[in-house]
């Protein structure tokens, strides 16, 4: 770990971490632009970088992207990211009551504390979990992938059926291409360009960036309400540690553990933490009227969920949300397979992610503390220019993958698919994670069946695999035995997971 | 039944139809794949499994639509005739994808140079997304020129990607 910090403090790595965190904060602060979109757009630029540089840039963007959302959530009641929705409940009333600086100061401090709490879990648990995961064979991995996919589809906002449909459709779109076992083309329908399958990057950029731009531009773009932050320092006191310490610690732990579960995301972590804090409070009636603990609990939990979500990513190669799925794509591009062997084969990357996460949180504190006034101004940039610029970047980024316009057409097609799915209330999270996990799922299942001579019941002799599959089954069945609300037609959700 | 709910139900019907088409493609593609020889599963198994799951989920979705319509006492034909936004409101959402397709088509099929094509795209989108005026056109021309030249410079000289 010490070596990872030494590597991280080299000028190039610090530079990329600084750039990633700064850009992440700005993008996170702009409503409609998300961390996943930013990371997907940056991926093509990381091709030519050293893997450590690429990882530090992307981790910085992730931390900055989630944290930046609090600025507009507090000042404009428009959460920059879905994870900051809870911050609007008390942050905006505080700003309206003449305490915008205090709300921002508490939000920034809470974000950093949440990040640091989850870093301790990340650094402490990851090497141990990775060692444990070394015992896993193909059945266990198949069970784990199924569990992650089902949990993601079932627990995402909206209907379970649509969540599952999204995951299965995502898996189906990963099928075309050369079959790795037989070496023959599959589902290519005589199109040579389909022999290499749909590229991860064009699919990601299309599904997230293009669909989002098309959605944003479908309605007239009106200038935002605007908010001028009064001059003055961000007030924070030593007394705050005593006043909010317990809340931060509890919310940090809640956020980390919710982040660990696939598909739940920072917005739910913040909501659960907010509800818990309100239930435990002696003044629950003050929540929603500009109460400081409300801002603290939400912001601590949503940042802590990032560290939690990174744990299954680096120890088992299982993405907890869309952003982690994109990070898996980033590692794969650099020929790195996330999972337990990452700690043995590329320890500089595994520990580098852990170290970068901590330093990104500290950088985020420094950057947001010193520049929050200017970031609030940047969010007022004309959206027409912003969206046009992003659209050009999408085209160039997709083209740069293979110097081929086929990838650009794929990107446009997946943009249309993503928009259509969202219009029909199908969350994009399960769709993209299904796309990423499909090859792993098939490879592990085929390997498991080969090892057991085609005997499916061999899984009964593998306790861990059985547990994973049982959790998947329970996750799927529980809503059916519940109110039935989720299993049926729920209103379409805006975004499944952050 | 409120119009928004009727629209949501119609979207579910469209989704189910699109899903069934995808399942059909999977089954059709799997038909041409060889039977497993050296391993139990073979390459056709997953397309068939996923196709089956998609059909099942699409049918469940349709069943839900039917159940909701029956509970509300609305026939599908009534829900289809619900008023919808037409005219100018529909043109705007089509403008951006049309510009994007035209831009990529120009770069791909006509091999047009990157910088001028991008300037034209940026101006077109700028006029479409904000109030069209001479001032807007000038601002977006300058923005398009700065954006395309800087992207071209970075990708060509630093990332060795020829944008044309």
Image: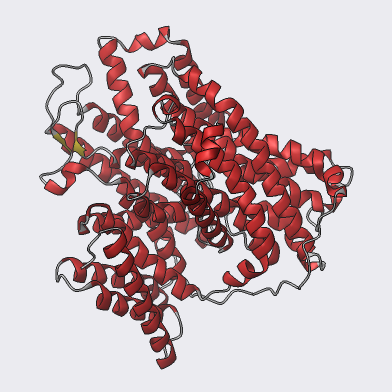
Above or below: residue B100 compared with residue A69: below
Horizontal side of A33 relative to A394 (left or right) equals right
* Residue B95: quarter of image: bottom left
Q: Position of residue B138 (x, y in %)?
A: 39, 88
Above or below: residue A254 compared with residue A405: above
Above or below: residue A129 compared with residue A172: above
Horizontal side of A203 relative to A369 (left or right) equals left
User: Residue at horizontal 28%, vertical 11%?
Assistant: A451
Nearer the observer, A416 or A315: A315
* Residue A138: quarter of image: top left
Nearer the observer, B68 or A302: A302
In which quadrant is the C terminus of chain B drawn? Answer: bottom left
Q: How many marks?
A: 0
User: Residue at horizontal 65%, vertical 38%?
Assistant: A255
User: Residue at horizontal 48%, vertical 48%?
Assistant: A13
Q: Position of residue A146 (x, y in %)?
A: 42, 27
Horizontal side of A305 relative to B78 (left or right) equals right
Is residue A108 something that shows in the picture? yes
């Amino acid at each position: 770990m010490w070596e990872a910090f030494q590597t991280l403090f080299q000028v190039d790595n610090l530079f990329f971490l600084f750039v990633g965190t700064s850009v992440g904060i700005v993008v996170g602060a702009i409503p409609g632009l998300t961390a996943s979109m930013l990371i997907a757009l940056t991926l093509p630029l990381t091709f030519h970088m050293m893997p450590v540089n690429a990882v530090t840039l992307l981790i910085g963007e992730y931390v900055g992207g989630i944290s930046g959302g609090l600025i507009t959530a507090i000042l404009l009641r428009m959460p920059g990211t879905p994870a900051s929705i809870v911050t609007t409940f008390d942050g905006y009333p505080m700003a309206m009551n003449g305490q915008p600086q205090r709300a921002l100061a508490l939000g920034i401090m809470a974000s950093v504390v949440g990040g640091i709490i989850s870093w301790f879990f990340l650094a402490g648990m990851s090497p141990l979990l990775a060692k444990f995961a070394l015992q896993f064979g193909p059945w266990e991995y198949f069970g784990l992938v199924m569990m992650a996919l089902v949990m993601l589809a079932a627990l995402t906002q909206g209907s379970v059926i649509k969540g599952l449909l999204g995951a299965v459709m995502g898996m189906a779109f990963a099928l075309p291409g050369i079959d790795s076992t037989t070496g023959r083309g599959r589902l290519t329908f005589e199109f040579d360009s389909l022999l290499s399958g749909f590229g991860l990057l064009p699919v990601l950029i299309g599904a997230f960036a293009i669909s989002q731009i098309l959605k944003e531009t479908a309605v007239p773009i009106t200038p935002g309400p605007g908010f001028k932050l009064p001059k003055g320092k961000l007030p924070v006191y030593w007394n705050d540690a005593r006043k909010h310490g317990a809340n931060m610690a509890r919310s940090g732990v809640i956020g980390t553990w919710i982040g660990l579960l696939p598909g739940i995301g920072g917005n739910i972590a913040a909501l659960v933490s907010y509800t818990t804090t309100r239930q435990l409070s002696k003044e629950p009636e003050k929540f929603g009227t500009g109460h400081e603990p409300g801002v603290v609990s939400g912001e601590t939990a949503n940042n802590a969920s990032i560290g939690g979500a990174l744990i299954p990513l680096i120890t088992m190669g299982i993405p907890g949300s869309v952003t982690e799925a994109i990070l898996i794509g980033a590692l794969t591009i650099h020929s790195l397979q996330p999972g337990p062997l990452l700690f043995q084969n590329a320890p500089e990357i595994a520990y580098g992610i852990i170290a970068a996460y901590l330093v990104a949180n500290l950088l985020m504190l420094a950057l947001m503390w010193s520049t929050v006034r200017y970031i609030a101004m940047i969010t007022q940039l004309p959206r027409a220019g912003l969206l046009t610029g992003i659209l050009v970047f999408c085209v160039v980024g997709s083209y740069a993958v293979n110097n081929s316009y086929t990838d650009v057409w794929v990107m446009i097609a997946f943009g249309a698919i993503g928009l259509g799915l969202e219009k029909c209330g199908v969350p994009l999270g399960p769709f993209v994670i299904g796309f990423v996990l499909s090859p792993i799922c098939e490879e592990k299942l085929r390997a498991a069946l080969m090892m057991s001579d085609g005997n499916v019941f061999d899984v009964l002799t593998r306790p861990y695999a059985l547990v994973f599959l049982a959790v998947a089954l329970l996750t799927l069945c529980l809503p059916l035995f519940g109110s039935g609300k989720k299993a049926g037609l729920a209103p379409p959700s805006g975004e499944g997971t952050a | 039944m409120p119009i928004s709910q009727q629209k949501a139900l119609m979207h579910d019907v469209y989704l189910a139809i699109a899903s069934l088409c995808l399942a059909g493609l999977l089954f059709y593609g799997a038909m041409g794949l060889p039977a497993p020889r050296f391993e139990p599963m073979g390459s056709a198994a997953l397309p068939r499994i996923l196709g089956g799951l998609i059909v099942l989920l699409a049918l469940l979705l349709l069943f839900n639509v039917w159940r909701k319509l029956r509970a509300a006492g609305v026939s599908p034909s009534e829900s289809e005739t619900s008023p919808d936004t037409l005219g100018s409101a529909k043109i705007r959402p089509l403008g951006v994808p049309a510009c994007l397709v035209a831009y990529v088509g120009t770069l791909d099929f006509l091999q047009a140079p990157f910088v001028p094509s991008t300037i034209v795209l940026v101006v077109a989108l700028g006029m479409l997304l904000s109030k069209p005026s001479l001032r807007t056109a000038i601002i977006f021309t300058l923005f398009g020129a700065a954006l395309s030249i800087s992207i071209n410079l970075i990708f060509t000289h630093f990332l060795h990607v020829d944008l044309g």
